[in-house]
Amino acid sequence: MYTLYYLNKNLQMGTLKVASLDAPVLIPENLIFSNIRRGINFIKEPNKCVDFTDLERLIISSEFFDSSLVNEADFRRANTYLTPLCPIELPLILDVVYTDRALWSYPYPVVVLRSNTVDGVFVPINGTEGASTFTNMAMIEVNETYFLRLKDAEIGLVSNILQHYMPT
């Protein structure tokens, strides 16, 4: 889930909540975007595929902003769209499972889940989501056979499933 913060023509703050930036976002009123948040984390350098203007990117990346710098022509028009320039949400793919670790390439922390069966209930490998959250690699239990899957808890995206085999 993304939250887009904006200023309208009266310089009042507003927000738009969207599940994904891969689909066009309808602009509800004349506005200029001032900040973006993914889940609970603010993004200071938005993805190049989000069609923000140069001024919007400057505002988003700055600590302070002087609203007197905004001209009439800088506002986006109501009933237009913020459209993606290329795919924004990366797929979440569990690349490989070795004897003692799992590897993947994804820009955000994910929860590593395990199940005894491929269609069973997947639970965090270390008991809780917080203790089972990793970025790009996780050490895993060696002496068991089970299935692994990744989950981006902020947006609910899940990965493919790979099996971990107990070494012989």
Image (tube, helix red, strand yellow):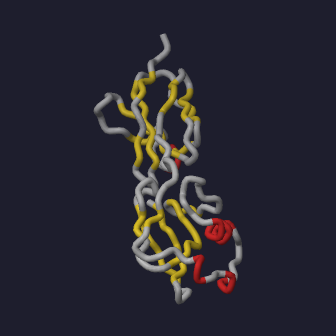
* Viewer-proximal residue among 89 and 31: 31
Q: Nearer the viewer, residue 63 or 11?
A: 11
- Residue that lies at the very extreme toward the bottom in this rendered image: 10
Residue 122 relative to residue 135: left or right: left
**In which quadrant of the rendered image does the N terminus lie?**
bottom left
> Residue shown at 56%/86% (left/top)?
11
Residue visible at 61% across and 69% down in the picture: 56
Q: Residue at x 58, y 35 (%)?
A: 137
Residue 164 is situated, as x and y percent measured from the top left of the image, at 45, 23
Left or right: 146 with respect to 11?
Answer: left
Q: Nearer the viewer, residue 69 or 11?
A: 69
x, y percentage for residue 156?
40, 50
Q: In which image quadrant can residue 101 be found?
A: top right
Q: In this picture, is 128 found above or below 148?
A: below
All told, the count of numbered labels is 0
On the image, the x and y values in percent for residue 136 come to 58, 38
* 1 sits to left or right of 13: left
161 in relation to 150, above or below: above
Q: Is residue 96 above or below residue 56?
A: above
Q: Is residue 14 above or below residue 20?
A: below
Query: Which of the two residues, 32 or 60, is positioned nearer the viewer here?
Result: 32
Q: Position of residue 47 (x, y in %)?
A: 58, 54
Residue projecting furthest to the top: 168
* Image point (68%, 78%), residue name: 65
Q: Residue furthest front?
A: 73
